[in-house]
């Protein structure tokens, strides 16, 4: 579900950038679009930071599990 929200926000941000680059917006429309774009960019940045932290945690956990001294079993 969070991925859908990220993808949706990214698509909205892309649409805002395209509209602003077209040059067809008034100053007021541009400011409103810019404000919305900043909010969407911050949201996307937070989601990417969260994903990065999760990947780092998973890699750390994986490394801790695989880097253990070999224990020779003797019967």
Image (tube, grey):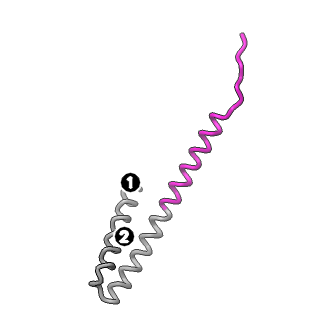
Q: Is residue 25 left or right of residue 6?
A: left
Across and down, in percent, residue 35 comes to: 41, 79
Question: Compared to 54, does 11 lie above or below?
Answer: below
As drawn, the residue found furthest toward the left would be 24
Residue 13 disc label: 2
Report the label total. 2
Instruction: Give the quarter of the image for residue 65.
Output: top right
Instruction: Give the quarter of the image for residue 29.
Output: bottom left
Which residue is located at x 39 percent, y 76 percent?
36
What residue does disc 1 label?
1
Which residue is located at x 54 percent, y 51 percent?
54
Which residue is located at x 62 percent, y 39 percent?
63
Which residue is located at x 52 percent, y 57 percent?
50
Q: Distance between the residues labelled 1 and 2?
A: 18 Å
The dominant secondary structure in magenta is helix
57 is within the stretch colored magenta: yes
Span highlighted in magenta in the image: 47-75
As drawn, the residue found furthest toward the top would be 75
Q: What element carries label 2?
A: helix
Q: In this view, does 15 lie to the left or right of 45?
A: left
| Disc 2 crowd, CA 10 A, few/some/many (<14, 14-19, 20+) | many
Task: Tell which circle, 1 or 2, labels the residue nearer the N-terminal end.
Answer: 1
Question: Compared to 68, does 47 lie above or below?
Answer: below
Q: In this view, does 71 lie to the left or right of 25?
A: right
């Amino acid at each position: 579900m969070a991925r859908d929200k990220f993808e949706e926000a990214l698509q909205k941000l892309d649409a805002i950038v395209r509209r602003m680059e077209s040059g067809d917006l008034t100053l007021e429309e541009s400011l409103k679009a810019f404000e919305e774009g900043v909010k969407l960019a911050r949201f996307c940045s937070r989601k990417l930071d969260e994903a990065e932290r999760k990947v780092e945690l998973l890699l750390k956990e994986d490394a801790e599990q695989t880097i253990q001294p070999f224990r020779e079993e003797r019967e």
